[in-house]
Image (cartoon, rainbow, N blue to C red):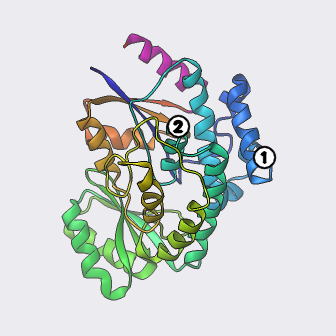
Amino acid sequence: MSKTAFIFPGQGAQYVGMAREICSQYPESARVFNEASEALGFDIGDMVFNGDEDTLKITENTQPAIVTASIACLQPLLAEGIKADFTAGLSLGEYAAHVYSGTFLFADAVRLLRKRGKFMQEAVPVGVGSMTAIIGLSREQVLDACAMAREEGVVEPANFNCPGQIVISGEAKAVEKAAAIAAEMGAKRTVPLAVSAPFHCSLLVSAGEKLKAELDKVDVHEMKVPVVANVNGEIVPSVDYVRESLYKQVSNPVLWEDCVRTMIGKGVDTFIEIGPGKVLSGFVKKTDKNVRTLNVEDITSLENTLRELAKG
């Protein structure tokens, strides 16, 4: 029997105007932005719809903004009675997955993400760390390249996105050295990422500890839909493990390819990416070209998704 997963994007997917079309036509989506503004104490809708890229790119703004846009884009699907059998998100997108599953109240999630972004940015001064995507090497090769570059400082795999695309993270000199080694090993490309901090590596352990303290203050509810965790690519076994998986996620690699394979192994053959962009859809297709990928980020993509789902 066909199964569906809702998947939610992470940092880098943001753009000014995301979710605007859907909010203009669906009052329940507009209400999501109002709820986020109330929770955060400023007009996040104005920042997302009318602001500038630089303000949106500030990590403590980006994180709650993407999840707010994603949950807003989710509302038309819920109104149509469309449900997922599994859910997951890339990095901060995992919080949107937990909101959909009922683990967190939406207001709690956006407040947590505002703090998470702040903690992650403060952990490493701007310019000290960097991230680079390595295209065309295996996991083992990337791990070897990082090991060989460690004399320059901290460098570790940060995102296992899909076969042949792995992001490394750490101190800038060490990341540069590992990328050069990867190129010598035969990487098709090495692409420095425009990020403000070296996410998902051991330099962010302090950020994870601060986040842990904040997670302890938030109510966690039973999951209504199985959530697949970034830290191990497996279904979160119980509500008791939610906080641990999210605080570890900050300084550990995101095993996105593993998450996708876990869901496919459970019978998922339709992935709906909800929120800005289609990056995750691309990763899913590169992991298994036989599954169906759909997305919802504006009216055109929403209508296309509803049409495709109606076909069965």
Q: Which residue is drawn at the image coordinates 60% and 55% (left, top)?
A: 218
Judge by depth and name the residue closer to the eye, 239 or 89: 239
Residue tagged by mark 2?
Answer: 100
Q: Is residue 42 left or right of residue 236?
A: right
**Does the magenta-highlighted stretch encompass residue 307?**
yes
Residue tagged by mark 1?
Answer: 38
Q: How many labels sit on residues? A: 2
Q: Which residue is drawn at the image coordinates 38% and 85% (left, top)?
A: 153
Which numbered marker is on residue 236?
Answer: none
Q: Position of residue 67 (x, y in %)?
A: 59, 45
Label 1, label 2: how far apart the Cα atoms are = 20 Å
Q: Position of residue 165 (x, y in %)?
A: 31, 55
Q: Is residue 8 left or right of residue 104?
A: left
Q: Which comes before the other along the chain, label 1 or label 2?
A: 1
Image quadrant assignment for residue 154: bottom left
Q: Is residue 249 above or below residue 175?
A: above
Q: Is residue 29 left or right of residue 130?
A: right
Where disc 1 sits, the SS reads helix
Residue 298 visible in rendering:
no
Binning the other alpha carbons within 10 Å of mark 2 as few (below 14), some (14 to 19) or many (20 upward) gives: many
Q: Amino acid at mark 2?
A: Tyr
**Image quarter in which the C terminus is found:** top left
Q: Which residue is drawn at the image coordinates 53% and 54% (left, top)?
A: 11
Q: Residue furthest bottom?
A: 151
Q: Which residue is drawn at the image coordinates 47% and 58% (left, top)?
A: 246
Magenta residues? 297-311
Q: Position of residue 173 (x, y in %)?
A: 42, 82
